[in-house]
Amino acid sequence: MLIGSNETTKLIDRYAIDNLKIPSIVLMENAAIDFVNEIDEELDNFLIVCGKGNNGGDGYAIARQLWSKGKKVKIFGVSFENLSCDCKINYDICKNIEIKMSDNIEKLKTWILQSECIIEGIFGTGLNSEVKGVYKKIIEIVNEHSNQKEIYSIDIPSGISGDDGEIMGTCIKADKTISFVTYKKAFLNTKNSKYFGKIIIKNIGLNQNFFKNFVNEYYLTKLDIKNVHKVRNVNSHKGDFGKVLIYAGSKEFSGASVLASNSCVRAGAGLVTLLTSENILKNNILSEVMLLNINDSRTISKSDFKNELQKIENNILNSDVIAIWNWQK
Ligand SMILES: NC(=O)C1=CN([C@@H]2O[C@H](COP(=O)(O)OP(=O)(O)OC[C@H]3O[C@@H](n4cnc5c(N)ncnc54)[C@H](OP(=O)(O)O)[C@@H]3O)[C@@H](O)[C@H]2O)[C@H](O)CC1
Ligand SMILES: [K+]
């Protein structure tokens, strides 16, 4: 999965709009549909809190989508003036379909209490300075009055910097964050993970592989592993999947040899042989790994030494990959 700063996410967005000719309003609609698909079906009564930018626009579009599913929806708008272009389009539709809307802070408290779920789109990747004034107040009210209610954040919890996950004065404490296109850099800031809740990334109609050159950082997911995982021919033999020789472990330190050997087996190597000091490991620790014990005592006889060397040489010649433990007493 692509990891994106605010800037890279915007670049991808711009490329999709300017070069791929996907209208921005279509991206917003896709974002809203993807978002709504991740909302718990049991929830029925929603309050959407919208800012003035495209994050707020996503909020208005989500409100429409929920309305079309017959859900109860109200909207609190930070302001209905100076909305971004796509935000205004969705705001106008919400007005036309008569979704209840208000920008009155007192109503915000009442409406939160009447709802089961609060979806917030106050700020997304466009947050560019410390949250103050009315925005700070709105975020605090949402956090304070949402006890026992689900809070869903659009793209990123409002008030968190998308670039480093730091709190810009104050921020929403989400139960679920449904984010678009990239795994935001912010989510790597584990110090603040309690504010993100469960993180879900949606593609909003774009394909991550198409944009992989826009970033140089990737978040490894089960899906990524699945994509590189090759289906094996039923007639194949374990010898077809590489032979690994690991030389590791001593009487005092045997852990690394076990970890490395088991990791190779888990990663799919065909034959894994651990070359290690005599008697340091019981065979049953390594179920699929072949153990090759060597006598590495300092008082070994010359002929035994030759035999040990021969054993090692044979194994080296027979291996595709050799891992050597670098530890000196
Ligand atoms: N491909 C995608 O990822 C898509 C993302 N979408 C959504 O769009 C937002 C980003 O939208 P954007 O309009 O760029 O930004 P925001 O909505 O986050 O916020 C912009 C407004 O907020 C004002 N602002 C910024 N910081 C502050 C602050 N500290 N206090 C008050 N106001 C602030 C800003 O005003 P400026 O005048 O300062 O610029 C804007 O008014 C993304 O997160 C997604 O949710 C698309 O919908 C689909 C494609
Ligand atoms: K948000």
Image: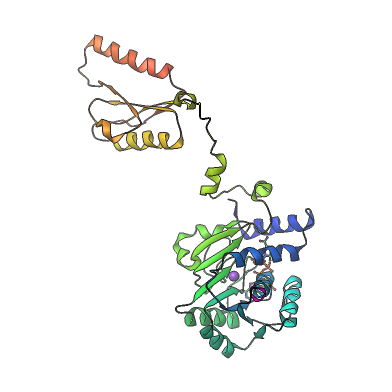
Residue 198 locus on image (x, y percent): 49, 63
Q: Is residue 164 visible?
A: no
Please say which color scheme the image uses. rainbow
Q: Is residue 285 left or right of residue 234?
A: left
**Magenta stretch?**
66-70
Q: Main secondary structure of the magenta part?
A: helix
Q: What residue appears at the point 68 percent right and 82 percent down from the top-left corner?
A: 99
Q: What residue appears at the point 54 percent right and 35 percent down from the top-left corner?
A: 231
Q: Nearer the viewer, residue 175 or 79?
A: 175
Residue 217 locus on image (x, y percent): 58, 48
List the single residue furthest toward the left.
299
Q: What residue appears at the point 33 percent right and 30 percent down from the top-left corner?
A: 248
For ligand 2, give the image quadrant: bottom right
Q: Is residue 314 above or below residue 124?
A: above
Is 50 in the magenta?
no
Residue 219 locus on image (x, y percent): 54, 50
